[in-house]
Amino acid sequence: CPLPQRGLQALALALLLAGGALGAARGRRFCRPVNATIAAEKDDCPVCVTVATAICSGYCQTKEPVYKSALAPVSQHVCSYRAVRYETLALPGCPPGVDPAFTFPVALSCHCSLCPMDSSDCTVHSLGPDFCSARGGFA
């Protein structure tokens, strides 16, 4: 049973849009754990130490509504931790009385979700994970 002309046009448009969406995502890596270097530091310790860990990074499909309404909240999804383990290292050169322990997350798995503001930096212009503000720089 042949499809009417209008049905064929709708099917062709749907396939074109689906192909465009897949093509737009091509070349982008989807949300996943990736190796990264972070700066470990504490306020009273003189130097930073670079640490290799896994962080969540990548593309999360999202959409921006054409018509924005105060009644319909906009929610953008970001790549964030699903499962994490924590590791601890001792920072060198910390003065007596300062705990040298630095604990950091290691991403085991990631997913796209609303930004967990209590544990993540979801700003557009953050300092980056390898920024060091210690007066002695990197060890």
Image (cartoon, grey):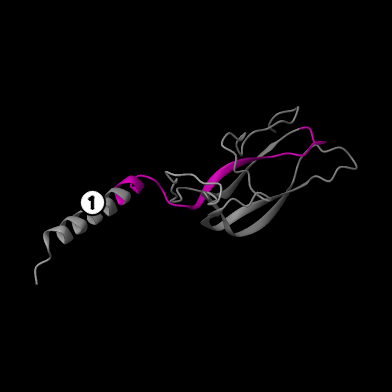
Residue at 16% x, 58% y: name it: 6
Q: Position of residue 53 (x, y in %)?
A: 59, 48
The one nearer the camera, 53 or 69, is: 69
**Residue stretch rendered in magenta on the structure:** 22-46
Residue 123 position, x and y percent, is: 60, 39
Residue name at image x 32 percent, y 50 percent: 21
Taking the spot 61% from the left edge, 53% from the top edge, the residue there is 106
- Classify residue 81 as left or right of residue 139: left
Image quarter where the N terminus lies is bottom left
Q: Circle 1 is placed at which residue position? A: 16
Q: Is residue 129 above or below residue 136?
A: below
Q: Position of residue 54 (x, y in %)?
A: 56, 50
Q: Quick check: 64 left or right of 15?
A: right
Label 1 crowd (10 A; few <14 / some 14-19 / many >=20): few
Q: Amino acid at mark 1?
A: Leu
Of 124 and 39, nearer the camera is 124
Residue in the picture at 65% in, 49% down: 117
